[in-house]
Image (spheres, grey):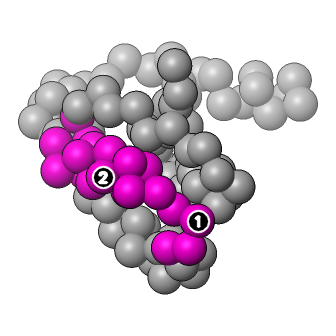
Amino acid sequence: MRLALALLLPGLLLPVGPAAAQAFATRDWNAEKCARYTALWPQALAMFGREGLGAEFLDRHAAFLASGCRARVEVCPRSVQELALADAMTIAAMNAGTASSFVPFRCS
């Protein structure tokens, strides 16, 4: 493990060249993450179905998507089905390159 980290760290510490820095600056990473996440949602609904999903859960999630995944909408899973769907979407979103903090599933 230490050897792997030692081999990876020098590459991570290299300065970013001007062309790469410009590419990162002009790319809208949040829009890309939202597009990936939005594409996953209908697939998850088809797999899990809508039984057990409340109107509030679905409406708040729709508001999150409608905002371009930018609004800080709390989509609180309350039923077993909502929690299972939220868990699956979190894992799918992470597999698609987003962080687990990107998804809107939270309860206050």
Q: Answer with mark 1 or mark 2, whichever residue precedes in sequence.
A: 1
First to last magenta residue range: 50-70
Q: CA distance from mark 1 to mark 2?
A: 14 Å
Q: Looking at the picture, does residue 94 appear above or below residue 50?
A: above
At numbered mark 2, what does the secondary structure look like: helix, strand or loop?
helix
Q: Is residue 9 above or below residue 58?
A: above
Residue underneath mark 2: 59
The disc label shown at residue 52, or none:
1
Judge by depth and name the residue closer to the eye, 39 or 7: 39
Residue 72 drawn at (x, y percent): 30, 27
| Residue type (three-letter) at the residue carrying disc 1 | Gly
Q: Quadrant of the N terminus?
A: top right
Determine whether, in the image, residue 37 is placed left or right of residue 8: left
Residue at the farthest bottom position: 46
For the residue carrying disc 1, how many other residues have a C-alpha within 10 Å: few (<14), some (14-19), or many (20+)? few
Return the mark for residue 22. Answer: none
Residue at x 15%, y 29% (from the top left corner): 25
**Could you tell me residue 56's position as x and y percent?**
38, 48
Closer-to-camera residue (85/37): 85
Pick the residue in front: 91 or 17: 91
Q: Is residue 21 left or right of residue 86?
A: left
Question: Residue 18 appears in which quarter of the rendering?
Answer: top left
In the image, residue 108 above or below residue 53: above
How crowded pointer 2 is (Cα within 10 Å; few <14, some 14-19, many 20+) is rated as: few
